[in-house]
């Protein structure tokens, strides 16, 4: 089966604010809804590629929308070739840099281009990449929990089939973190994996103290204990809290960001955000780096596209299940027996136009 020649005819962008199944409370701020940028790449063959960006805050939606509109004229009439378009945009933005708005847009456009190619072939993206549909063991991802009201959520998750749970910490005192982790471990039992996420909230010394106080609760990993860009700090925490594994990576921008972190010895594991790493094109480089460094690889949110690229990762580990876009899709990607399996064609994204209109941002 040959990959068809497609040409970009139009790029549409629509900002929405979608409701979340539950709020995501973190030590660095609360996410009460999902500000998303929906991108459609229309081609001359009648095939449309789709992807979405997660804007984190409504403050960025207008700027991201305008950025897509500004870059669109340079892409019209060009082939749907993700790597070629990546090189084109990289050259155009070389002096600006990749982090921030530019990186978010580039990564999302890349996903939409790959989606268009796989849809044109009428296959799931994972198949076009040489892999196969396969179930990925998933963990349910929670924010900071209230001991008085939120523990029943964990019971529901375990009953639904999750074999692992992640919670966020770091918003209060050490004793508060110890108490909630003790409650969580009692609630989920000894057979369910437990991950912790500090969302960059600690100093190096503070992170070491907290992790040592928590290490007896059988932790699968501790995530982003210090600032994401503090690679030296991550390495120091990692060295001082062994054998508790340190996880980071969701804020690595493009493959060179991952390479810098690996070179610094900043993490025992790798958690890659498909938007920030540069879409599918960036992910393919990331999974090669993870394989070369023998790093177990996990995704960060973006469950629909991540289910495809995680399935071709040779060191694939736990899949983060955090549904941020389901409210604007015709069909949510659901858990089955504690696992998630990609669907197609393409990335398996189809907008629910009634929901898109309802949650439109203006």
Image (cartoon, grey):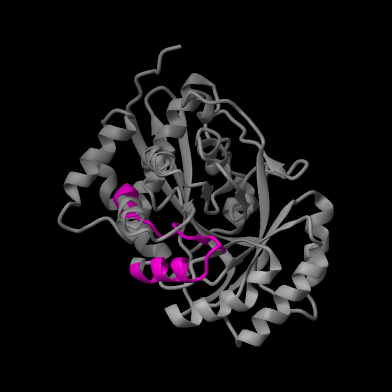
Q: In percent of the image, x 62 and y 78: which residue is there? A: 213
Task: Tell me which segment is drawn in magenta.
Answer: 232-257
Question: Residue 280: x, y in percent?
Answer: 42, 39
Q: In this view of the protein, which residue sits in the foreground, 80 or 337?
A: 337
Question: Residue 120: x, y in percent?
Answer: 47, 22
Question: Residue 246: x, y in percent?
Answer: 51, 62
Q: In this view of the protein, which residue sits in the foreground, 245 or 308?
A: 245
Q: In this view of the protein, which residue sits in the foreground, 298 or 111?
A: 298
Question: Residue 323: x, y in percent?
Answer: 63, 54
Q: In percent of the image, x 36 and y 42: which residue is there? A: 282
Q: In percent of the image, x 81 and y 51: which residue is there? A: 160
Location of residue 103 by image quarter: bottom left
Location of residue 166 by image quarter: bottom right
Q: In percent of the image, x 20 and y 52: which residue is there? A: 93
As displayed, is residue 201 above or below residue 54? below
The answer to whether residue 342 is left or right of residue 248 is right
For the view shown, which residue lies furthest in the left direction?
A: 95
The answer to whether residue 30 is left or right of residue 105 is right
As displayed, is residue 226 above or below residue 134? below
Residue 76 visible at all: no
The answer to whether residue 87 is left or right of residue 186 is left
Residue 92 visible at all: yes
């Amino acid at each position: 089966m040959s990959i068809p020649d497609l040409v970009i005819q139009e790029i549409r962008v629509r900002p929405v604010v979608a409701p979340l199944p539950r709020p995501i409370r973190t030590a660095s701020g609360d996410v009460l809804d999902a500000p998303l940028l929906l991108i459609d790449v229309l081609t001359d063959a009648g095939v449309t590629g789709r992807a979405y960006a997660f804007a984190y805050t409504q403050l960025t939606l207008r700027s991201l929308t305008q950025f897509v509109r500004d870059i669109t004229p340079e892409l019209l009439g060009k082939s749907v070739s993700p790597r070629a378009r990546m090189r084109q945009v990289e050259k155009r933005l070389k002096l600006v840099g990749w982090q921030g708005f530019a990186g978010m847009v580039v990564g999302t456009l890349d996903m939409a281009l790959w989606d268009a190619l796989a849809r044109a072939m009428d296959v799931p993206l994972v198949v076009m990449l040489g892999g196969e549909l396969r179930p990925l063991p998933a963990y349910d991802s929670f924010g900071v929990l209230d001991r008085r009201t939120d523990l029943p959520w964990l019971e529901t998750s375990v009953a639904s089939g999750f074999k692992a749970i992640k919670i966020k910490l770091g918003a209060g005192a050490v004793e508060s973190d110890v108490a909630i982790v003790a409650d969580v471990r009692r609630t989920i039992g000894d057979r369910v994996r437990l991950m912790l996420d500090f969302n960059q909230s600690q100093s190096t010394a503070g992170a070491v103290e907290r992790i040592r106080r928590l290490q007896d609760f059988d932790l699968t990993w501790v995530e982003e204990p210090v600032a994401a860009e503090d690679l030296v700090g991550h390495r120091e925490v990692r060295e001082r809290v062994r054998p508790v594994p340190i996880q980071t990576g969701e804020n690595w921008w493009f493959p060179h960001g991952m390479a810098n972190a690996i070179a610094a010895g900043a993490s025992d594991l790798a958690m890659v955000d498909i938007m920030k790493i540069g879409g599918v094109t960036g992910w393919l480089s990331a999974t090669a780096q993870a394989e070369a460094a023998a790093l177990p690889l996990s995704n960060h949110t973006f469950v629909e596209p991540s289910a495809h690229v995680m399935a071709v990762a040779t060191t694939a580990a736990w899949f983060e299940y955090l549904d941020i876009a389901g409210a604007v899709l015709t069909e949510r990607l659901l858990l089955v027996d504690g696992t998630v399996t990609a669907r197609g064609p393409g990335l398996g994204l189809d907008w629910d136009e009634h929901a898109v209109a309802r949650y439109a941002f203006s």
